[in-house]
Image (cartoon, rainbow, N blue to C red):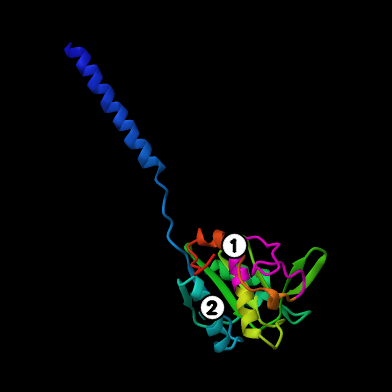
Amino acid sequence: MKNKSFVYALGLFLMFSCSEKKIAVEEPEQKPAITILILPFRDIKPEKVETVAAGIKKIYPNVKVLEVIDFPENAYYRERNRYRADSTIKFLNSRTREGFVTIGLTSKDISATKGKIKDFGIMGLGYRPGKACVASSFRLSRENSDEQFYKIAIHELGHTQGLPHCPEKMCFMRDAEGKNPTNEETDFCKKCKTFLISKNWKFSSI
């Protein structure tokens, strides 16, 4: 009788022990929120930087504006008097630690290789996902330029978080397709918002 009681007690102990271990394994790991670093290049006006920073902070409060710096010399493309966006991102990436994302802001013309076109002028570039991106005000319309610049910046930051281009024409993640459709964009679409919420972005409505 004693042996049977001992075996029964041992079985209960193992059952509860295994259950406790299973619960502990299933607990999700909480990753800390990233910090967005806004890095102005020396050519950009301070008021432009302030406008972009204020817009980003409304939906992602964890933002820090850094001191202005010069463009990396190796990013300059002398033949077209432009700066290569890919080289700029590599430079920014090398300065960005884990847990941070850097966006460079400039008024200079920037470019990247697109298909067979070696040097294609663009408004911004961001790798998906990535730790760095760049946005330029050079190709924006004079009207609503501040609003457009913010939309370009938020678009590239969306790429760094893992968002692809969106088929919704009103969404910030719309593919520009070589044009400037920013005046038609009004917000992130519901699908893109839901994705960003999983990355600790804050929205008043969805």
Which residue is at the front of the view, 160 or 57? 57
Magenta region, residue range:
154-179
User: Looking at the picture, how far across and down is residue 206, in whole percent?
Assistant: 54, 64
* Residue at x 66%, y 82% (from the top left corner): 137
Which residue is at the front of the view, 146 or 132? 146
Q: Can residue 84 be seen by looking at this rendering?
A: no
128 relative position to 101: left or right: right
User: Looking at the picture, how far across and down is residue 53, in whole percent?
Assistant: 52, 79
Q: Is residue 163 magenta?
A: yes
User: Looking at the picture, how far across and down is residue 76, in whole percent?
Assistant: 69, 78
| Residue 55, numbered circle | 2
Farthest right residue in view:
116
* Residue behind mark 1: 190
Alpha-carbon span between mark 1 and mark 2? 19 Å
Compared to 14, does 58 lie above or below? below
* Residue at x 62%, y 70% (from the top left corner): 155
